[in-house]
Amino acid sequence: MPPKTSFDWANVRKRRFGVWRYRELLPISDNVEPVTMCEGGTPLIKLNRAVDGHVYVKFEGANPTGSFKDRGMTVGVTIAKHIGVKGVVVASTGNTAASAAAYAARAGLACVVVLPRGGVAKGKLAQSLLHGARIVEVDGVFDDALEEVFTEVVINGKKDLYPLNSYNPWRLEGQKTIAFEIVDELSEVPDAIVVPVGNAGNISAIWKGFKELYNYGLISKLPRMIGVQAEGAAPLVATWNRKSETLLEIEKPYTIASAIRIGKPVNWLKALNAVKESNGTFIAVSDNEILNSVKDLAQYEGIGVEPASAASLAGYRKAIDLGILNRDDSVVLIATGHALKDPDTISKIF
Amino acid sequence: MPPKTSFDWANVRKRRFGVWRYRELLPISDNVEPVTMCEGGTPLIKLNRAVDGHVYVKFEGANPTGSFKDRGMTVGVTIAKHIGVKGVVVASTGNTAASAAAYAARAGLACVVVLPRGGVAKGKLAQSLLHGARIVEVDGVFDDALEEVFTEVVINGKKDLYPLNSYNPWRLEGQKTIAFEIVDELSEVPDAIVVPVGNAGNISAIWKGFKELYNYGLISKLPRMIGVQAEGAAPLVATWNRKSETLLEIEKPYTIASAIRIGKPVNWLKALNAVKESNGTFIAVSDNEILNSVKDLAQYEGIGVEPASAASLAGYRKAIDLGILNRDDSVVLIATGHALKDPDTISKIF
């Protein structure tokens, strides 16, 4: 870790807004050349009409491939190229695949994406094809795809393919920059961050980012982390509510929000710790609540998101109703992916 | 126009990278509140593998609605709201509609979009629906849609709908910030800018931006403007090559690049002047060349664009072959919209 003194807001703010602005806070040597497409630096949009209060959307759909995954992938693929692998492999509900395919292409690496058959939104599948990834479809859900990758790479030892799923720590290093950008732009720490939770890497990474800023003395308080899952795919909500010390897995997760249709999140323990340490909570929302939030973000705020992203607004509303958050709390909702990722679901609703 | 002295790079660079960073160069009073989603500030990506030389892509697909249209729309809708209209109306091949729908929603204004039936890519249509626009389909191409808007609003006098097509000067004021951002980020002026040309607003606006910087003494040279059209929709190439003083219209424009499927560009005269003044040219490229460029940007550079955007790379290659540009010229290719706008065309190719 860099010494506290090497990071200075005034100095880093001279650089382009985005992941690599915070290079001193990434554990990557100066001589390593990033594989980058200027990811990050995404809009922080104040909500004016959908809700009252001090609520912002961090719109990750404005990343190069249309989701927050690009933050982790720029770091992960930078490392993959640096250590000299031939290719990368990911299991994915679609966004990770699109991002891995794009960044691997940029780095000149092969890319294999393992997808749940029939479970990937159209735009994401098109992106994997477009960027030249080899697509392997498995029967089942994301969790089965991840097991396939794990078996092939770790058990069967296909070491020429570097696995870039979110248990890969480099991915989380990139994703933690969401926290840095929020503080950079607001010049203060919000009371809470509300994050859609699938494989649970993002909420863990964002919390890591805030804690680092705090530990370096760059901020003086920490936000509460609120994780939101869809009712049909809510293993962490169950685990949290029942105070279980092991993950209460969901065998057949289902939600219209395909990006968070995950029953066995690999980062469950990190996510539980993030929520516990931050005095936060996990909340489940229904598919109907998600779709209403998609509509409200689009028609009152102009923000077009895929269903999983809108879980954060749905979760925020529930947190207000339940008295978990107050109306005058300052809150940032993470909107993870663009509406264009999933035009079929949109067309079905409207 | 502001006095030269009110603009200072060091000062404006303290603001968020994007359209409103350059507020002193936009003709909008300080007391007018922008309708904004932090548009602009898009990636400028150095090409490493698809071509040699100093070639960058300005990736406008990373705007909030996935195309450069957001730059013009933030300014246009800000003005529409300020003057107190009830709603806005646009004719569109799809991207303008998506952007108008989103920004109108954010401003609480009604939005009517007039589209050529069957001529709009799926993602764009989904966006218009999502953001709650009223969709009117007309038989024919974009030019017929635009005539419909003109007739309804100007001839039939439906003054409660404010027209936001690219003959609206406010749109061009927003779009000119592409020039500002290029200079801001590179700290120099490229030798050439290559722009896909449909209704010809963007090339006119970008040129306006460079000229303003030049006239204020903020830059000391100007780039050449290279306009690229698809062979089946190339009225400006024909007009330029034949040195015609009137536009040689195309009655039935056709190209796979639906965003530039336009036969009677309203900004033709401004675009001709931009190219003439800048010692540039117009170039036609085939649909095959466009699709090859889509593929090369995606598979060598990781950049996912809709077909119209790739016309700029195809045009650059042709300009090199024809000796119009040199391999060591520094060049910025404008990539106007995201691959996710048109997943069907991508799926068809791959």
Image (tube, coloured by chain):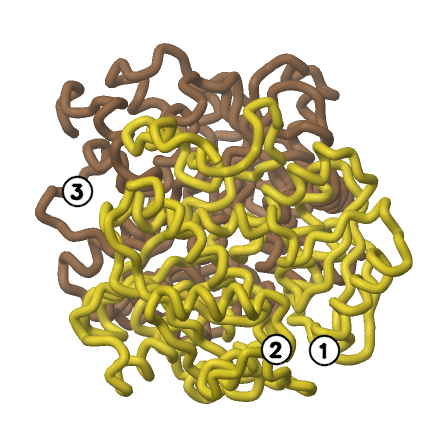
Chain colours: A brown, B yellow
Give coordinates of residue A25: x percent, y percent: 23, 32
Give the amino acid type for the residue marked by disc 1 in the picture: Val
Mark 2 near mark 3, Cβ–Cβ under 8 Å? no
Q: Mark 1 — residue? A: B141
Instruction: Inspect the image, locate mark 3, and give the three-letter code of the amino acid beneath it.
Output: Ile
Residue occupying the far front of the picture: B245
Q: Position of residue A35 (x, y in %)?
A: 25, 56
Label 1: state its secondary structure: loop
- Which residue corresponds to the image point at 25% horizontal and 69% vertical from the top-left? A109
**As drawn, which residue projects farthest toward the top?**
A220
Circles 1, 2 touching at the beta carbon (< 8 Å): yes
Q: Earlier in the sequence, mark 1 or mark 2?
A: 1
Q: Whole-Å distance between the Cαs marked 1 and 3?
A: 52 Å
Report the residue at 38% width, 51% height from top.
B211
Neighbour tally class for label 2: few under 14, some 14-19, many 20 plus, Cα within 10 Å:
many
Q: Which residue is mark 2?
A: B261
Residue under label 3: A28
In whole angstroms, how far apart are the C-alphas of marks 1 and 2?
8 Å
Q: Are marks 2 and 3 on the same chain?
A: no
Q: Is residue B241 visible?
A: yes
Could you say which is closer to the camera, residue B199 or residue B169? B169
Q: Secondary structure at mark 3?
A: loop
Camera-near label (1 vs 3) is: 1
Depth order, front residue of B172/B304: B172
User: In the image, what residue type sits under mark 2?
Assistant: Arg
Q: Residue at x 20, y 70 (%)?
A: A86
Residue A177, picture quadrant: top left
